[in-house]
Image (cartoon, rainbow, N blue to C red):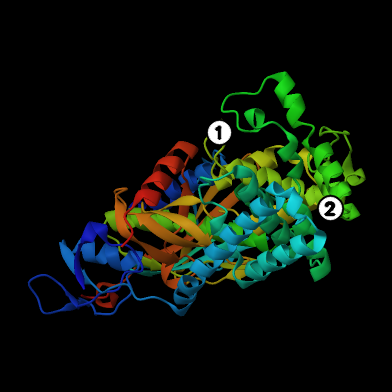
Amino acid sequence: MKAVYINPFLNAAYNVIKDVAGLEARKGELRLESSPIKGNEVNVVIGVTGDLTGQIIFCLTEETALVLASKMLFALATDTFDELAKSAIGELGNMIIGNAVTELAGKGYICDLTPPALFIGRNVTVSTAAAQFLVIPFEMDIGKLDINVALQESAPEDREEF
Amino acid sequence: MKAVKVDKLVPGMILAQDVLIPRTAVTLLPSNAVLTVEMIRRIASFNINEVFIAELQKSEEEKAEERLAPVMAQAHENAVNAVREIVTNPEDRLLEEPIIAGLVGELLEHVKMDASLFLNLTHLKTYDNYLFSHSVNVSILALLIGEQLNYSSEELNQIGVAALLHDIGMLKIPMEITHKAGTLTPEEYDEIRKHPIFGEEFLAANNMSKDIRAVAAQHHERFDGSGYPNKLKGSDINYKARIVALADVYDACISERPYRERITPQEALRIIVADQKLYDPQLLKVFISTMAVYPIGSLVKLNTGEIGKVIKVRNKQPFRPVVQIHFDREEKLLEEPVRLDLSDEANHLLFIKGTLSTSEHKRAMDEIEKRPKK
């Protein structure tokens, strides 16, 4: 995986978390892991198609998700991870990837996304097409957010030719 | 059909002709395609200058809204006029529960028809006396909260009437005070604080039922005991008065007053949440989820730069309301607004980046309201 298409995700995650939750996210050491991705309690899966294909998966604990969601929902601490909190986390994923895709387009990678799908439960595993995926760990004062990026460049013959 | 420069394209517009890749006969996008962010990006990436856009096609939902809008506006205006009639002509003996209940019945019918359309009307600038439109707006908001609480139609009617009459005591406060543009002196403020008592006396003299009197008497009491006139606390405050307190504060915030500009809907929610100890926590939750993250009337900026007004909020999708795009990405006012449903899957690459600040909101609203009607 090339830095040129990883950096947009780093920037987007940092900026969106700062904008919507007012939190400073610190990036940890990137590492490569092998498929499948083992999820956390709350997992947001977004598919990428176009010049890049694969999945982006956000994983976090329910506690962290709840705090993030409540920050997006007027600091009204929701005590349970309810529908409203779920829609907030899905939207957070959408915002981060949406920002990243915009930046990617500027670098010549035109991609489309699937709407975010939320998976709840500790035992979620996601098998990715790519054998390896990159983990971008973010540390916030309220907990951790791992962004797993399993992307590959579409083979030239697979690219949509216009 | 009209030619539109690529940087003026807005998602939701429909292509009137095929878009070809320059200097080729290869179709990039077919006619009738509904433009998404992604498509606009592709068009731009080929350095295409302008494309032909069809006259906007309207969805069934949008057509229904257009048919309903004047009906709703009329109902709102009628209600405001009726309230004025009732409270300013005491000798006509219109201040009777059945008459007010009939009025509230009509409001409720319209809330049920399309609550979003009706809520949009509460954002209209009040050129008229604030008290009357405020009474109607608070009644609409209280009915909405009541609906969320699964109130019976009888209970809904009670809260609607109570909300409609909650500020009636204000009529006994001298106009020089209620219409004063500057800050009030402590003496004048003391005078204002008598309106709940005046209201209760007035309603008792007109044989109104207990809850209706209690709402007038207690809508300025606060959950933590910091309100007036009796510093009542928590469950000692009438339940309906606790509901009306929220509706009252919210509508007061979003209305223009002689001494300040209107506050944006989202800022109003923030103000209420920042002081959450003042309100019944359970009711506050219901209220916030009813108004959602971007309440009706909010001006929001999309990630692509366009600015639009929230006109409809869908249940369970608080982050994906229906917006009316009024400004393009260069913040130029569009000739006519474009409706954009963010809950539509075709628009999933779009999201709301934030709301306008109070001063930006005012400027934008002035521009929208002054736009010549086609």
Task: Measure how far apart labels 2 and 1 are at the Cα level.
Answer: 28 Å
Q: Position of residue B370 (x, y in %)?
A: 36, 49
Q: Secondary structure at mark 1?
A: loop
* Residue B156 in the figure: left or right of residue A102: right
| Nearer to the camera, B234 or A43 | B234
Quadrant in which the C terminus of chain B is drawn: bottom left
Front residue of A160 and B247? B247
- Residue under the point 40% across and 50% down: B369
Q: How many marks?
A: 2
Which mark is on residue B212?
2
> Visible in this render: residue A17?
yes
B358 in relation to B348, above or below? above
Disc 1 marks a residue whose amino acid type is Pro
Say which residue appears at 61% left-offset and 23% top-offset: B183
Report crowding for label 2: few under 14, some 14 to 19, many 20 or more residues within 10 A (C-alpha): many
Residue B317: image location, x then y, percent:
58, 64
Task: Give the residue at the far front of this rendering.
Answer: B91
* Kind of residue at disc 2: Ile
- Residue nearest the viewer, comparing B59 with B274: B59
Q: Earlier in the sequence, mark 2 or mark 1?
A: 2
Q: Is residue A61 visible?
A: no
Image x and y of residue A161, in percent: 22, 75
Chain ID for label 1?
A: B
Chain assignment, label 2: B
In the displayed structure image, the side of residue A13 where residue A120 appears, left or right: right
Residue B258 numbered tag? 1
